[in-house]
Image (cartoon, rainbow, N blue to C red):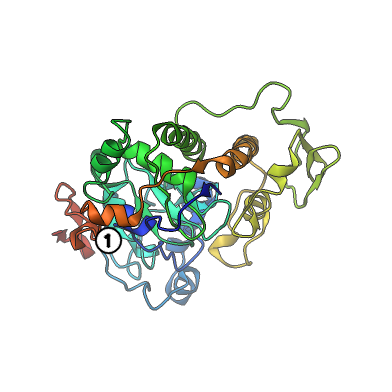
């Protein structure tokens, strides 16, 4: 982590004041690594009747087949009680961040999710960046353009409204930083980049008034943000370091192991290399990313449950995703030493922000903004007023 010469760094919770608790799915089967399985699971649910449908649904106190809830903002799933729905198209699955660096698919149907956090769905668009607290030492924060469904710490959107409007930053923060930095760029995306680069495990954010250090930190954070979001141009390693499939992957791999000497990832008889040791060892909150990613795609669901409906064979898309994941982790691992070497030698402290009136933030900044341009259907087809 960055070398900081002061102990009065402001808290992330004050710099990005609006946060939302993580989603609570309540059941695993509405999430999967491929969208086709989700549609097959939905069809199987609706084909079942009575007690069989209830068992497949996996009811909780928050959601049963009789729950009446409205649509998720921006989605068109039905709102009829599932106990009496005979035929209803599956809501088109959406891409989500289901685990650290693990993009999967979710059925965006409010009837299937115990606590869906509609306030996040209202601000999810192409401009949004969600920052997720992980509790990890090396990667205390993740950033994603996708709606995060992973069960970690709080979620902090960069913007409080759709369209990149109203940054979720302490009022007056960017202007104060610009003044202290002599006019250096302090747009919301720059501040987020800095936060990603320097935030420590205790979720404190050292701030500098040195334009050179600020520029270095922002550049580093922008690189991290690009790798984590993976939008636009796809990341690539230099020639000779790019991972390739050296031996074809089996149709249904069941084991994964790593040969450090050969820098090779083995999926049964399939081989991918080169895979640097730091990629195999890349962990978030004590869990190896590659192992978790593989286990999610190969562990059979419990027989008789909807989660057991999975692809019969390993899809080619998963191989492509695995190669890209290896690339992303390799490039992020290279940035860890740079983050450790970043020395914040002249700080804008929490006390400074208090004196400048930036802190404490108004109570309204910790609450979601009103979003009035969403038309949302309420339970049983009624109109919802928000």
Residue 44: x percent and y percent? 49, 60
User: What residue sits 63% from the left and 67% below the top?
Assistant: 302
Instruction: Sort mark 1 into few (<14), some (14-19) or many (20+) by Cα contacts within 10 Å.
Output: many
* Depth order, front residue of 350/30: 350
Residue 332 in the image, given as x and y percentages of width and height: 59, 39
| Residue under the image location 74 percent in, 23 percent down | 240
Outermost residue, right direction? 261
Seen in the picture, residue 143 relative to 331 is either above or below; the reply is below
Compare residues 223 and 5 and report the one nearer the observer: 5
Give the quarter of the image for residue 376: bottom left
Q: Nearer the viewer, residue 326 or 188?
A: 188
Q: Is residue 231 above or below residue 269?
A: above
Image quarter hosting the C terminus: bottom left
Above or below residue 273? Residue 296 is below
Mark 1, residue position: 79
User: Is 224 left or right of 192, judged from the image as shown?
Assistant: right
The residue under the point 54% across, 48% down is 3
Q: Is residue 106 left or right of residue 251?
A: left
Question: How many numbered circles are shown?
Answer: 1
97 horizontally vs 291: left or right = left
Question: Which quadrant of the figure has residue 114?
Answer: bottom left
Which one is in front, 157 or 6? 6
Left or right: residue 276 compared with residue 150: right
- Residue 362 appears in view: yes
Q: Residue at x 27, y 41 (%)?
A: 174
Question: Secondary structure beneath disc 1?
Answer: loop
> Whole-percent x and y of residue 300?
66, 59
Q: Is residue 318 visible?
A: no
Q: Quadrant of residue 242?
A: top right
């Amino acid at each position: 982590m960055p070398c900081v010469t002061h102990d009065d760094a402001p808290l992330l919770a004050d710099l990005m004041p609006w946060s939302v608790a993580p989603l609570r799915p309540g059941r695993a089967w509405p999430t999967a690594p491929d969208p086709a399985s989700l549609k097959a699971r939905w069809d199987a649910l609706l084909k079942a009747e009575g007690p069989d449908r209830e068992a497949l649904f996996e009811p909780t106190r928050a959601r049963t087949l009789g729950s009446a809830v409205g649509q998720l903002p921006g989605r068109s799933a039905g709102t009829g009680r599932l106990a009496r729905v005979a035929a209803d198209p599956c809501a088109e699955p959406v891409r989500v961040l289901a685990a650290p660096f693990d993009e999967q698919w979710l059925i965006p149907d409010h009837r299937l999710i115990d606590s869906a956090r509609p306030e996040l769905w209202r601000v999810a668009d192409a401009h949004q960046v969600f920052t997720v607290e992980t509790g990890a030492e090396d990667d205390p924060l993740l950033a994603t353009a996708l709606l995060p469904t992973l069960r970690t710490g709080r979620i902090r959107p960069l913007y409080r409204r759709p369209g990149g409007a109203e940054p979720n930053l302490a009022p007056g923060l960017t202007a104060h930083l610009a003044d202290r930095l002599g006019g250096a760029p302090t747009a919301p995306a720059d501040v987020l980049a800095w936060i990603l680069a320097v935030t420590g495990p205790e979720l404190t954010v050292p701030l500098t008034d040195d334009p050179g250090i600020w520029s270095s930190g922002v550049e580093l954070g922008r690189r991290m943000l690009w790798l984590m979001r993976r939008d636009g141009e796809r990341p690539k390693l230099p020639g000779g370091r790019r991972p390739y499939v050296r031996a074809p992957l089996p149709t249904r791999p069941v084991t994964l192991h790593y040969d450090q000497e050969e820098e090779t990832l083995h999926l049964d008889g399939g081989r991918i290399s080169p895979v640097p040791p730091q990629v195999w060892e890349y962990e978030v909150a004590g869990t190896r990313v590659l192992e978790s990613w593989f286990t999610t795609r190969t562990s059979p669901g419990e027989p008789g449950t909807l989660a057991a409906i999975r692809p019969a064979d390993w899809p080619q898309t998963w191989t492509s995703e695995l190669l890209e994941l290896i690339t992303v982790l390799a490039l992020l691992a290279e940035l860890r030493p740079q983050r450790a070497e970043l020395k914040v030698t002249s700080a804008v402290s929490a006390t400074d922000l208090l004196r400048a009136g930036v802190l404490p933030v108004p109570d309204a900044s910790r609450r979601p903004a009103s979003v009035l341009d969403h038309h949302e259907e309420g339970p049983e087809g009624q109109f919802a007023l928000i």
